[in-house]
Amino acid sequence: MTSQTSSDPTGRFGDDPVRIGVIGTGAMGAAHVDNLSRWVPGARVSQIFDVDSERAKAIGGQVGAGAAASAEALIESDDVDAVLIAAPDPLHEPLTLACIELGKPTLLEKPIASTLEGGRRVVEAEVAGGRRLVQLGFMRHFDTAYVALRESVANGSIGTVRAAHCIHRNAHSHPSHTNESVLFGSMIHEFDSVPWLLDDPLAAVTVFASRVPDGALKDLQVAVFETLSGVVVTIEVFINAQYGYDIHTEITGTEGTASLTPPYGVSLRRSLSETAGVDGRVVTKDGTARYLDAYRIEVGAWVDGIRSGVAQGPSAWDGHLANLAAFSAVESLHGAGRVEIPREPRPTLYDPA
């Protein structure tokens, strides 16, 4: 799917493209560079930074972008109108704060910050500036299947929602993963998407981890959430599932169920090649392939919002709410049992239009 750019009522860009600086050229950052260059006519990747300078130069060379000397230099550059941050999690807060200080729109990959306090500081900085500048990289908001699933709940076609069940599996974990980052780095997508799908805030969480050898990553983790209205939600995250990237969500209502896919029968999954498509589930090698269209729509919507002056997509506040759930889950993982998720008043900057 392609995205067409909106008009530019402010006249700031006219016929000129929005010049994008991209920080981080791992799999996600490189995919964003490609999507911006191929699918978003109102944007141009102008600069790229990565600690691997040779990789930055190589990827930049493919799209006619320069390689910045540092992330800070990229953000401050007069050749950059907006910034896409796909850097490691600990850098999210300082880089985003630098963008807000200069008034540069930012597409920030999840999480908003690697600490709860860091996410709150990003929200406070944006509120102090009086303008939404940050869009969080929760791409499920732009995935056609998730949008249709959300509509099936909103239109009452399955009656009153009673439960939801989510699966989130990766083939292999990143070496930097910790017991806690399984929650705030991977399950964070469900912490955002579940309340969005159900239009129902998360209220409490209990986390269970499967038994592993001493010192091993507490990988398969299951969170049981309660929403404000009393819906029960189970979320399984398994980041070393070996066979592929597998995402599934089913919502159970009083008059039926709605599911991302139509699984039927029994299948055995041991490798991507022997199981893809066996039962209707979309199993891919990685998340970039699964959400290919969603990422294209996401960056297109971001650029549309920059050009129109109307922010689109998940906000910094949505990122903060996801972090509130994530770090409540971390507390539960560390032995606290059932943890109530703090409820905080939403700043008026983030009120629905």
Image: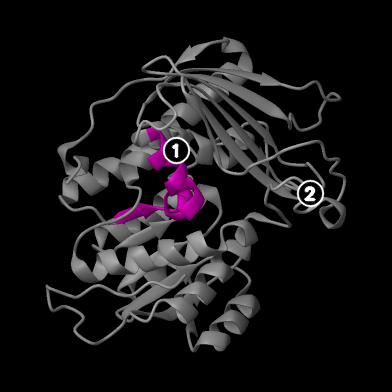
**Position in image of residue 108 (x %, y %):** 42, 55
Residue type, numbered disc 2: Val
Q: How many marks?
A: 2
Q: Residue at x 20, y 42 (%)?
A: 352
* Magenta region: 134-153
| Type of secondary structure dominating the magenta stretch | helix
The residue tagged 2 is: 278
Give the left or right position of residue 19, taking residue 297 as reference. left
Instruction: Please tell me in which quadrant of the rendered image residue 218 appears.
Output: top right
Q: Is residue 300 visible?
A: yes
Question: Few, some or many C-alpha atoms within 10 Å of disc 1 (few <14, some 14-19, many ≥20)?
Answer: many
On screen, residue 312 above or below 270: below
Q: Judge from the rendering whether residue 125 lies leftward or rightward of residue 194; answer left or right.
A: left
Q: Which residue is mark 1?
A: 192
Above-or-below relation of 2 to 110: below
x and y percentages locating residue 161 in the rendered image: 44, 23
Q: Amino acid at mark 1?
A: Asp
Pick the residue in front: 281 or 69. 281
Between 144 and 66, the one nearer to me in the picture: 144
Q: Secondary structure at mark 2?
A: loop
